[in-house]
Amino acid sequence: MDYQGTISRGVRAPIIRQGDDLIQITADCVCGAAGQGGFSLQDKDVVAVTEAVLARSQGNYATVDQIAKDVQNKFGDETVGLILPIFSRNRFSMILKGISKGVKKLIVQLAYPSDEVGNSFVSVEQIMDKGVNPYADVFTADEFRKTFGDVRHVFTGVDYIDFYQKTGKCEVILANNPCEILKHTKYVINADIHTRKMTKRTLLKAGAKKVVSLDEILTESVDGSGYNPQYGVLGSNLATNDSVKLFPRDAQAFVEGLQAELKKRTGKNIECMVYGDGAFKDPVGGIWELADPVASPAFTSGLQGQPNEIKLKYLADNDLAGLSGEEAIEAMKEMIRNKEDDLVNNDKSLGTTPRRLTDLLASLSDLTSGSGDKGTPIILIQNYFKNFSM
């Protein structure tokens, strides 16, 4: 019996700077880790590289002034409503500064009790105890504090209402209906991530004169800035006190180039991907990690699709209930080898909850690399495509 299942390894890398050849550096690091660790690279291994180092190697940065100029070009001398941003200093403070600087007046509408990805400053229990209807009730910042008192984030301890008011030099209201902002202005930037297309349609249908989503800001260079033609400033992170690092561009060319380089060096067909936030939820704080627009912006073709697996626990308790020991093992292997090509709505797959391979692998990579000081922006995943029968 082969006792080794999926292995996820963090691979250390040097500090990546603009202009570095990330394909060569990644290949060097992965091959170096294999040599140092005494293991071999195999067909269908997965090499995942965080979006942060790819964007850094591209120099894909933008300043507050460059964001402001693009916003001003889009809205001119108008009062603008900014709705449904996430609560994050890392993700949103510089974007907020840029937007505020690019408009005549800014009104920010925050969602409550939490933002789109689960960052909260009041609990659902508090909402119910106060008799508040979150689908209809609207608050000013002062009214919200008077109703709920302490509104600091459960983990960071930050009062995001106060922080956004000061950062954006703006008026803040709290409401969950995106159309509430239209009582203040018909010019809107919707800052939500995964619901942005629906929100934009809703606002335009309700009478907004102009709606711009974050994926439409910095889609091309402004005064020499970085840019992302697909995601704009979505997926960006704070870089300095005056700039952001944008989501990487041309990521597909990178993963295909990396795959070719690894093939040349090892002779193996290794799958490659770029990963950002994992798609998982914190069980205590209720935070859904995915603040990037996608978990993986680019991946090689072998990572398309979703797993097609049978549930070993179900089969062990049902089809193989009368077997044990080596006989049960061999019977299970045989069932796996002969499983149907499509197990959707099949009792044998009950409880496997299929997801896209890239979302699963990106989440595994993000958890392995962490977000702090591990220094492993490259992840090597082995045996992921092996099952109990192999």
Image: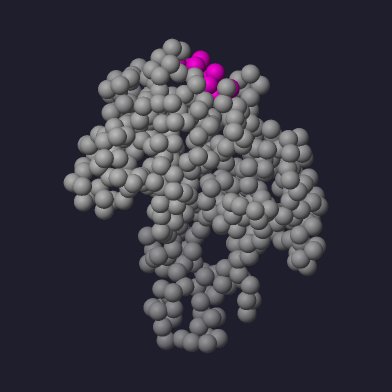
The residue stretch that appears in magenta: 66-75
Identify the residue shown where x is 21% and y is 42%: 133
* Quarter of the image that includes the N terminus: bottom right
Q: Which of 266 and 199 is in front in this view?
A: 199
Evaluate whether residue 90 shows in this view: yes
Identify the residue shown where x is 54% and y is 69%: 337
Identify the residue shown where x is 51% and y is 58%: 307
Residue 74 in magenta stretch: yes
Name the quadrant containing residue 268: bottom right
Q: In the rendered view, tell whether residue 268 sits above or below residue 90.
A: below
Evaluate whether residue 263 shows in this view: no
Name the quadrant containing residue 15: top right
Q: Main secondary structure of the magenta part?
A: helix
Q: In the rendered view, tell whether residue 190 sits above or below residue 235.
A: above
Q: In the rendered view, tell whether residue 390 sits above or below residue 31.
A: below
Q: Which of 261 and 373 is in front in this view?
A: 373
Q: Where is residue 194 in the image (x, y as percent from the top left)?
A: 43, 39
Q: Position of residue 37 (x, y in %)?
A: 76, 66
Identify the residue shown where x is 60% and y is 58%: 368
Q: In the rendered view, tell whether residue 35 sits above or below residue 157.
A: below
Residue at the extreme left of the image, as rendered? 131
Q: Where is residue 358 in the image (x, y as percent from the top left)?
A: 55, 50
